[in-house]
Amino acid sequence: MNTQTALRVGLSVTTAEPLLTGGRLDGLGVYSRALLEHLPGAGVEVLPLSFAPHGDARKVQLGRALPLSFPLATLGDMVLPSSVHLSTQAVLAKDTRGTAPLDLFHATDYRIVRMDCPVVATLHDALPISHPQWASPKLRKLKNWLQARAARKAQHVITGSHYSIRELVEHFGVDENKISVVHHGVAAHWFEPPPGDERDVTLGLHGLREGYFLFVGTLQPRKNVERLLEAYLSLPPVLRSARQLVIVGQPGWRSEELVKRIKDAQQRGENVVWLDQLTDDRHLRHLYAGAGAFIFPSLHEGFGLPLVEAFAAGVPVACSNTTSLPEVANGAALEFDPLSVGDITAAMTTLARDDTVRARCIAAGQRRALELTWDAAARRTVAVYHQVLSH
């Protein structure tokens, strides 16, 4: 490590590459993009690096293409050079050092390869192994193999919650002493209420009335949206008439039956709205701003970013009492048993009708969100870098 200059870190941004995201970042993409934006403010010179989409380096837009494709680097188990020339990409301010070695490489997803510098890997969970029933069989074996290898290649592992440590130790055999918890964060703009007229235009565009129950997440088994829908349909008719259920998320693996149930409810005239093509981050903020309550019934989360977005947006939250969610909420949400439709229904009813509980959840949620910012996550991440380089 060069002590005369800022720490120079190669950051994996493959999950945020525009050609691969289809315009909407998933949790890994949000995480990678947030570190890219906030690490420089924590005193790090960041070089964004990406495995080229379809092996074509010309398609890399966010950073610079790594010299090999991910399959070649992985299957051949090659060591990639840490000296990267910056002048061909306008991804940083002009580099006066020309070709200079990286002090460290940070892989933000399972695409982890050997480098001739220390490697820090962020592993978010061990879901394909810990709960194979919630992972697509098509990708399960590949992801298991990749993540297990990745855990061995990295000098240190970052994860988003203390719950995930237990999974990584048990299922990947990672040494607990090599794992640091860095909670994910929320961007500053989530704390700023959007202009009311803009919000109202977005709500009107989708036929929404302020005060609805909101869920955000991909439609897949572990998100438990089936029970959320059942809980909503169990509410008293007068409450359903007053408050829509708004589900924001693209259809994922094994979502066919859920999609059918949502459409059946809509055809019966139930107040259920499904937005499967929402890609504009501003519009998503508008939807949070118009919500009366955020309901997050997930069965498994390594962190759960939508929870913190709702906190920051000033929306009262009810969430599952399982996996990492109680740790992330830290008492700021109304918690329920996600396997109990009755429990979910009761939580929804409370947030709709009890103004005292609502006010308490809103205030506690905003306090919690202030502890979980990307600036704080970036500072803690840099502390991990220095810890690794000091050993």
Image (cartoon, rainbow, N blue to C red):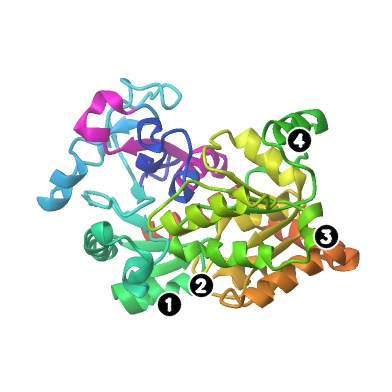
Separation of residues labelled 3 and 4 (CA atoms) = 30 Å
The kind of secondary structure element at disc 3 is: helix
Q: In which quarter of the image is residue 156?
A: bottom left
Q: At label 1, which amino acid type do we have?
A: Arg
Residue at the front extreme of this rendering:
268
Separation of residues labelled 1 and 4 (CA atoms) = 39 Å
Q: At label 4, which amino acid type do we have?
A: Pro
The kind of secondary structure element at disc 2 is: helix
Q: Which mark is residue 194?
A: 4
Residue that mark 3 sits on: 238
The kind of secondary structure element at disc 1 is: helix
> On screen, 24 above or below 359?
above
Residue 106 or residue 159, whichever sits in front: 159
Callout 3 crowding tier (Cα within 10 Å): few <14, some 14–19, many ≥20? few
**Which residue is depicted at the point 47% across and 41% down?**
25
> On screen, 118 above or below 327?
above
Between label 3 and label 4, give the one nearer the viewer: 3
Q: Does the segment drawn in magenta span residue 44? A: yes
Between label 2 and label 3, give the one nearer the viewer: 3
Q: Which of marks 2 and 3 is nearer the N terminus?
A: 2
Q: Does the segment drawn in magenta span residue 292? A: no
Q: Quadrant of residue 146?
A: bottom left
Residue that mark 1 sits on: 166
User: Tags 4 and 2 in contact by the CB under 8 Å rule?
Assistant: no
Q: Give the range drawn in magenta.
A: 31-60
